[in-house]
Image (cartoon, rainbow, N blue to C red):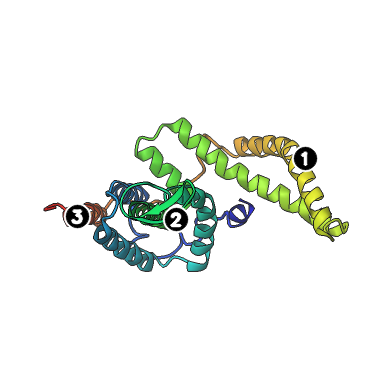
Amino acid sequence: MLLHVGAFHLDIDSKQTTPWHQLAPRTRILCTVLFVFAIVLTPNGHWWTWAIYGLATMSLLWLAQVTLSVLLKRLAVEFTFIGVVLLGTLFRGGGKLLWAWGPLQITTVGLTILGSVTLKALLSLLVFNILTLTTAVPALLHALIELRVPPLLVAILTSMYRYIGVLNAEFNAMRRAAVCRNLMSSKRWQRLVIGNMFGSLFIRTYGRGERVYQAMLSRGYQGLPQVEKVSPGKRGDIVALTLTVILALLGQLIYWPR
């Protein structure tokens, strides 16, 4: 988790000038949500559908000029949490039995489900990470408001983004203090120090968070961060939404005669 927080600057590629960046933020969100729905609603074993969606995702990755090193680090961290769920899909009954050991068994159905769920998770995470890497966080939050997301939910997301950064700063300050006092010289001391850090971290950040919030109010905070000039909807936005719908339907219709 700390690795992911360490790379917490979500929108590091938001200053690029590509056709994807020229779309309005709400259009990017709509395209992403529509595409992810098409991915996750695809039945298991439809490999050609995911090949089409994978090709489209790689094309978007190239078009948006995303920093691959950061994208791969985020995917690695996210898959550590998803891996446990993916492993549970392997041991399913049905189909031809390939391996068995006590109550555990691997069948052709289990392998099909494992491959299908893995592809769904991988493509969905790729698309969502492309969105967050290429869209500024304030613009993303304002786009959610434009899409009629409840303002209270958007304010909660804003606070989460801001205060995780505060937690990260406090933890790094405590870690530097421990290193300066030579308290991280052995693995045993590292476990003890880091355990105590987590205990005191929330106590320290409570007061820090309150001071940050008062500073935000004094600078005119009204529930959402200030946003720069956002690209309005143009003809390109309609074209992007249309292409997304066509691509989603094309992937589903390839198995329709069956």
Q: Element at badge 1?
A: helix
Residue beneath the point at 43% across and 49% down: 91
219 to 80, vertically: above or below: above
SS at mark 3 in the image: helix
Measuring from the top left, give residue 65's x and y in whole percent. Answer: 41, 67
Residue 14's disc is none
**N-term-proximal mark, 1 vs 3:** 1
Query: Which amino acid type is shown beneath numbered disc 1?
Result: Ser
217 sits left or right of 120 in the view: right
Does 254 appear above or below 158? below
Tell me the residue that label 3 is attached to.
Answer: 246
**Amino acid residing under circle 3:** Ile
Check disc 1: other Cα within 10 Å, few if <14, some if 14-19, many if 20+. few
On residue 200, which mark appears?
Answer: 1
CA separation, marks 3 and 2?
Answer: 22 Å
Residue 124 in sight in this render: no
The answer to which of marks 1 and 2 sits earlier in the sequence is 2
Q: Position of residue 40 (x, y in %)?
A: 33, 48
Which numbered disc covers residue 129?
A: 2
Q: Earlier in the sequence, mark 3 or mark 2?
A: 2
Query: Is there a contact, CB below 8 Å, between mark 3 and mark 2?
Result: no
